[in-house]
Structure formats: C-alpha cells, structure tokens
Image: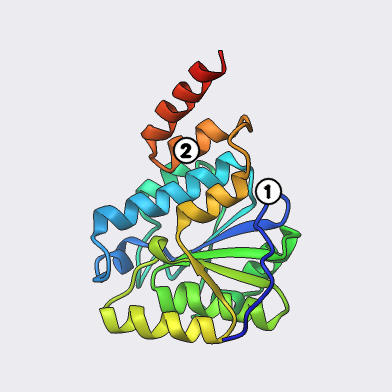
Amino acid sequence: MNIRKYEPLTSDNAAVILVDHQVGLMTGVRDYSIGELKHNIVALAKSAKALNLPIVVTTTAAESMWGPTIPELVEALPGVNIIDRSTVNAYDDARVAEAIEATGRRKLIFAGISLEVCAGFPAMTAVARGLDAYVAVDACGTFSDTKHQVNLFRMQQAGVILSDHATMMVEILKDNGRREAGPVYAALDMPWATLVGQVAAAHRK
C-alpha cells in the first residue's frame, strides 16, 4: 500500500458526490440497517450543506429500474438538481463529469448505493484522473458482507481514501470556534457537542 502525505480536507478543496441513494437500491442493502444508513446519508448531506461544500447528486434510471432518490435525502437538500443517467459508472456520464469539474475541487468525497459500484467506480476514476478521492463508507450500502469487504480492499489498492462521514466533515470544520460548528454538529446528530460547548463557554467566563 502506498503511503501518502496527509493533506487535510478543507472547505476550499472538497466537494461531495452522492450517487444513487435510491429507494429500489436501498431495499437490497445488507451491510447496514436501513435506519442507520439513512441517518448517515442525511447527516453527510446536511453537514456538507452547513459547510457550504459543493454537492453533486445523481441517480440511475430513476423512472424505471431503481426508483427515486430516498425522500429523506431530497428533504435534506431542497431544490437540489439530481442528474439521472444510464451509465453504470457515474463519471462516464458527461453531465456528471461536468458537474464535478464545475465544483473546481480536487478532493472529492463519494457516497453511494452500492458501495463498490456507485461510490467505488467513480472514486477510482477520479484517482485515475489525478484527483483525490475519498469514500464515506458508512454513507454507502451494498448487498453482502463479501461485497463490502473485498471492495474496500480494491478501492484502497486503487488509491481511494476510506473514512466515515462524520470524521471527514469534522476535519473540514477544522475549528470548533467557527460559526458553522453548531449547524455541523447538529447535522451530524451529535447533541452532546452542544453540551461540551456550553461547558467550555462556562469555563471561559
């Protein structure tokens, strides 16, 4: 495994790409409970929005094979433009590739259903194009434990960086003194963070 110098995710270099979080695909997920997975997807979307990150959302065959985007994600990103495509690899659709390029960001955080196809394929493609690709593993889902495990190895071998949604969003937040801190922790569903902030404020008085 190649060891790469740590370069932090920031509000200025990162974008989030959400691929195929669709009702039909969600029914086949076996590596996470549906409730936990939906929580993580929405938390990623809301915290990315709170941090003002560019967000690209796409579906595959929404009106036929896999159905619409899960309503919880649509509600979290009101008015978002969802690009519906037919290609297996989201990056193979010119509109998706253009939308990603238009963000101007070189560090791309992917999440999708399934982990290995909807997140993995475009993430590995991004690496091949000279970009830094990350996958928020816990905001993805797939259809067996085998698929989950072996494709984590495959992505790592291709140079994709694996993490969880909350760690990457807190990394981007960087400073708990930022005005975005409250909305980010609320989006991540970390109510204890509010208590910690109140205790710290009390000690400063």
Q: Secondary structure at mark 2?
A: helix
Q: Quadrant of residue 66?
A: bottom left
- Image quadrant containing the C terminus: top right
Could you tell me residue 135's position as x and y percent?
51, 68
Q: Is residue 80 visible?
A: no
Disc on the earlier residue, 2 or 1: 1
Could you tell me residue 24's position as x and y percent?
30, 66
Q: Is residue 189 above or below residue 172?
A: above
Q: Amino acid at mark 1?
A: Ser
Residue reaching furthest to the top: 205
Q: Is residue 106 above or below residue 192?
A: below
Colour mode of the rendering: rainbow
Q: CA distance from mark 2 to mark 1?
A: 16 Å
The residue lying toward the viewer, choosing from 56 and 144, is: 144
Side of 109 where 127 appears, left or right: right
Residue at image point 28% right, 54% down = 36
- Image quadrant containing the N terminus: bottom right
Could you tell me residue 63's position as x and y percent?
39, 65
Which label is found at residue 185? Answer: 2
> Which residue is identified by label 1?
11
Residue at image point 64% right, 76% down = 126
Q: Amino acid at mark 2?
A: Tyr
